[in-house]
Image (tube, rainbow, N blue to C red):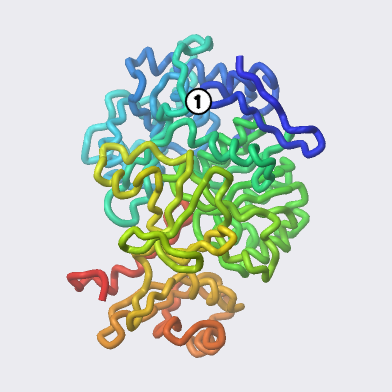
Amino acid sequence: METSTASPPANGRVHHPGLRTLVQTTRFHAEHRPDTAAVICEGRTLTYDALHRGSNRVAHALRAAGLGEGDRVAYLGKESEHYYEILFGCAKSGTVLVPVNWRLTAPEVSHILQDSGTRLLFLEDEFTQVVEGMPTAPPETVVRLSAFGTWRAEHADSEAEFEATSDTPVAQLYTSGTTGLPKGVVLAHRSFFAIRDALASEGLDWIDWRAGDIALIGIPGFHVGGLWWATQNFNAGTTVVAMRAFAARRAVDLIRDLGITTACVVPAMLRMMLTEPGVSAEDFTTLRKTVYGGSPIAEALLEESLAVLECEFAQIYGLTETGNTAVCLPPAAHVPGGPLMQAAGHPYPGVRSKVIDEQGRELPPGAVGEVCLHTPARMVEYWGLPDKTAETLVDGWIHTGDAGYVDEDGYVFIRDRIKDAVLVAGENVYPAEIENVLEAHPGVAEAVVVGAPDERWGEYVHAFVVPVSGHEPSPRDLHTFLVPRLAAFKLPARYEFIDRVPRNPSGKILRRELRDRFWNDSARKVN
C-alpha cells in the first residue's frame, strides 16, 4: 500500500510523497477518496473509484489484445473521461500512450502512427475520415470510442499485475513540428512527479494543490502542458474539469458555475476569455490560482488578467523535452511594472539553468545565448532518433533552442527562439521584445515580428499586426509609439495588417508560416 503525508491543515496544501508512478495514483485515491470526483466532462462525472476500476479494465483489455510493455497505444479524439481511463490503463499495462493532435491532417496523423509503431488506436468517430484518408494503413487494432464501454466491460476490474518504476516510459508526445517532421518525445513516470516533489521539498507554493480544488484544463491532452496539469491534480486527489476543446465562453461558464479554483491555460486563452462579451471579474471569484505558459505573454495582457481575474498567477516555462515546466515565475513576482514581469521565472529546487554561446561555453549573467535546463523530469529520448536525442540532451542538459539570459538572481529571461532572431546590420534583434512593446499600443490586439531579406542591412524587421476592431492604427502611429521605447535598429521597417495570427493547437505562433514567404526564393533562410 502507498503511504501519504499531507501538508499541515494550516495551508491546506496536499502532497502524497508515497506516490511515485501513475500506476499507484488511482489505486491510492480509490482507497482513500473513492467517491471524490476525479473527472468532470460535459456534465459527466467519474469518481476516483470508477477511474481506478475502469483503467484496470483497460489494462487487462490491452494485455488481452496482445500488447505488452513498451508497445505504443494511440488516442485520436477530443478530451473526455475515457482519455484518462486510457492514460492510466496504459500505465498499468506497461504500454505507452501516444496522444494524437486531432487537428492534424491525414498525412500528419499517418506519420505519428507510423513513426511510433502504434499497434492499437483509440479513435473518436468524428475523425474516421482522417484515418481513412491516411496514405498508410491504420494500426492492426482500432477501437472506436463509441464502443469503448463495451470493449473494456468484457474484462475484470481487478488490479493489473504490471508495476512500473519511475523510469518506465508512459507517454510519447509529438512536438508541434513547425519545421520538419514532428519528433516523438518519450516521457517516463518521473516527468509527472519530479516538480511536485521539488516544490514540496522546499515548502514552496509557487504552484500548489489543495484539498477540495477543482481544476480546469484549458490545454489539450495531446500537449505536455495539458497532460502534466491533469496528472498533477490526479496525483493530489483533486477534481479535473476537462473540456472537449477549449471555447472561451464555455470556459468562463465552467469557472463560474462549477466553482473552479485553479486553471492552466496559454496566454491566447486568457485573451479570448477576457474579450468575451459580458465577461467581468464576478465570473472568476472562485479562482485562487491561474497557471499559464506555452508561449510568451504580453505585459499588457498579463496586467489586464491580473486586474480582472484577481487571483494568484504563476507562469511556467519548459518544453515537452523537459517534461513540461522547469522554470516558474511565482505569484509574488507578478507585480505590475515590476522588474520580473518579463522573466520566464526561476528554476525549481533541483533544476539548474545555464546559458551557452555557439561554442558551448557558459556565459555570465546578463549575456544572451542558448538556454539549457537540467531537470529530473527531462525526457528519456526522441523516439527512434538517437542522433537528434544526442543533439538536444547533452550530459543531462536539455538544449532548448531558446535565446535568453539568466540574471544575477537566477531568473531566466527568454528573448526568442534562436532560429527566429533577426540579424540587422550585425545586431541580433529578438522578435518577442518588439512584439511585447507593440502589443502595449491601444490599437494593437496582437503582433508577430519576423526577419525579411534586405540587400542593404541583411535583414529588416517586418511586423504583422492584428488591429483592435474599429481602432486600426496607421504605420506612422505605430512608429511614433515605438521610437521612444526601442533602439532604432529594432524598429520595424514595414507593417502589415492581418485578421489573425496563425497558431498551432497549443497556442504557439506559427512564425515560420509568416516568415517563409519572404525567403521562398532564397537558397538560404538567413541573409
Q: Is residue 336 or residue 406 the one in the foreground? A: 406
Q: Position of residue 398 (x, y in %)?
A: 40, 48
Asked if residue 38 lies left or right of residue 392, the reply is right
Residue 31 image point, x, y percent: 66, 16
Which residue is drawn at the image coordinates 39% and 28% (left, top)?
96
Is residue 124 shown to the viewer in this render? no
> Above or below — where is 213 with respect to 23?
below
Image quarter of the C terminus? bottom left
Residue at image position (38%, 72%) is 450
| Residue type at the position of mark 1 | Phe
Q: Is residue 137 left or right of residue 267?
A: left
Q: In the shown orientation, is residue 199 left or right of residue 457?
A: right
Describe the element under mark 1 as helix, strand or loop.
helix
Q: Is residue 393 above or below residue 67?
A: below
**Residue at 68% over, 44% down:** 204
- Residue 515: image location, x then y, percent: 33, 69
The residue that disc 1 covers is 88
**Camera sees residue 147:** yes
Q: Residue at x 56, y 58 (%)?
A: 410
Q: Position of residue 25 (x, y in %)?
A: 57, 24
Vertical order, 226 against 439 (above or below): above
In the foreground, 70 or 397: 397
